[in-house]
């Protein structure tokens, strides 16, 4: 296999590409956000990481500290304004600015069930973490980015928001579609302030979330069969694209929705 082979995880970012840049990564206690935070720290960034579940952000921060990286762990619910304000204040207190916000936090409810069987509580909590949370984090960092005259916001949509979720219900599809709309709106509003706002739309990613949702080997194979590249994403496949979105290489890109779905979404 060579480096152009879609089955190979290859990453080529200079060691110090994000040296001294300050990132706030939400949902960094597990999955993609966790791997992203660890990679950013290895690439020289100061990484504030938050998670709703107590202890998760601290675990990620410990891994980063063990590798001599710079991390600040925060337990916060991104759907609560006071939590977000407290978290952003802690980042400003530590490093004086937020250069890049990555809104990775988000819940997903139960495995697929039809809309008329979806409890309203699930709708509310999926919207709270994905939509309200991304909005609140953006709202809180934006004044500081405007003053700085620069910044990046990277949101997480999903193949669900680009089409329909194969694994989850209408609350998730609708919430991720809202994230796309919010990205477009913010990109138009803040480009003149030097702030770029983009969304990644991953397809299904191997990890705890998808394992919790797919029921057995047969379902896993059925999901793989829908993906032209023939496999789920590895978390590193997603993280590498986020690193590109945070880097100078994407300096002319704002309002973009990047499908990273192994060909599942073709739009
Ligand atoms: N895993 C996939 O297949 C997949 C596919 C497409 C999009 N995505 C999106 O990518 C992002 C990361 O996914 P993942 O697979 O790493 O998820 P994950 O479920 O493994 O981790 C998400 C983390 O976010 C935290 N979180 C949830 N609600 C929160 C809140 N209100 N405040 C703070 N933290 C909260 C959770 O505690 C968890 O640690 C999510 O936005 C997800 O919707 C994932």
Image (tube, rainbow, N blue to C red):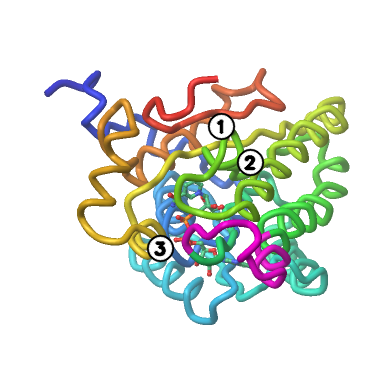
Would you place residue 218 above or below residue 78 in this image? above
> Element at badge 2?
strand
- Marks 2 and 1, Cα distance to the nearest angstrom? 7 Å
Label for residue 73? none
Q: Quadrant of the C terminus?
A: top right
Residue 257 at x, y = what percent?
62, 29
Mark 1 vs 3, N-terminal side: 3
Would you say residue 114 sits in the magenta stretch?
A: yes
> Element at badge 3?
helix
Q: Determine the residue positioned at 28% across, 51% down.
A: 219
Q: Are marks 2 and 1 in contact (CB under 8 Å)?
A: yes
Judging depth in this view, the residue of 83 and 204 nearest the camera is: 204
Disc 3 marks which residue?
64
- Marks 3 and 2, Cα distance to the nearest angstrom? 21 Å
Q: Quadrant of the N terminus?
A: top left
- Residue 204 relative to residue 165: left or right: left
Would you place residue 93 above or below residue 142 in this image? below
The quadrant holding residue 254 is top right
Disc 1 marks which residue?
245
Q: Determine the residue positioned at 52% across, 38% down.
A: 159
Residue 22 seen in the figure: no
The residue range painted magenta reads 111-126
Between marks 3 and 2 in the image, the one whose residue lies nearer the viewer:
2
Disc 2 marks which residue?
154
């Amino acid at each position: 296999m060579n480096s152009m082979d879609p089955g190979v995880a290859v990453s080529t970012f200079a060691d110090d590409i994000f040296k001294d840049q300050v990132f706030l990564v939400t949902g960094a206690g597990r999955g993609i956000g966790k791997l992203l935070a660890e990679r950013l720290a290895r690439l020289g960034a100061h990484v504030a990481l938050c998670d709703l579940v107590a202890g998760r952000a601290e675990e990620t921060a410990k891994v980063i500290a063990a590798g001599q990286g710079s991390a600040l762990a925060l337990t916060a619910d991104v759907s609560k304004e006071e939590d977000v304000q407290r978290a952003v204040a802690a980042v400003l207190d530590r490093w004086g600015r937020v250069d890049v916000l990555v809104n990775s936090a988000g819940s997903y409810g139960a495995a697929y069930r039809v809309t008329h069987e979806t409890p309203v509580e699930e709708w509310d909590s999926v919207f709270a973490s994905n939509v309200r949370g991304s909005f609140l984090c953006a709202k809180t960092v934006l004044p500081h980015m405007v003053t700085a005259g620069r910044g990046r916001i990277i949101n997480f949509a999903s193949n669900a928001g680009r089409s329909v979720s194969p694994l989850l219900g209408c609350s998730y599809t609708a919430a991720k579609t809202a994230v796309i709309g919010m990205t477009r709106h913010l990109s138009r509003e803040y480009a003149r302030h030097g702030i770029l706002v983009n969304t990644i739309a991953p397809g299904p990613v191997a990890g705890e979330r998808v394992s919790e949702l797919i029921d057995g080997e047969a379902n896993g194979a059925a999901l793989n069969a829908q993906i032209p590249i023939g496999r789920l994403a590895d978390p590193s496949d997603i993280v590498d694209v986020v690193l590109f979105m945070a880097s100078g290489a994407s300096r002319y890109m704002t309002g973009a929705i990047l499908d990273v779905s192994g060909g599942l979404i073709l739009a």
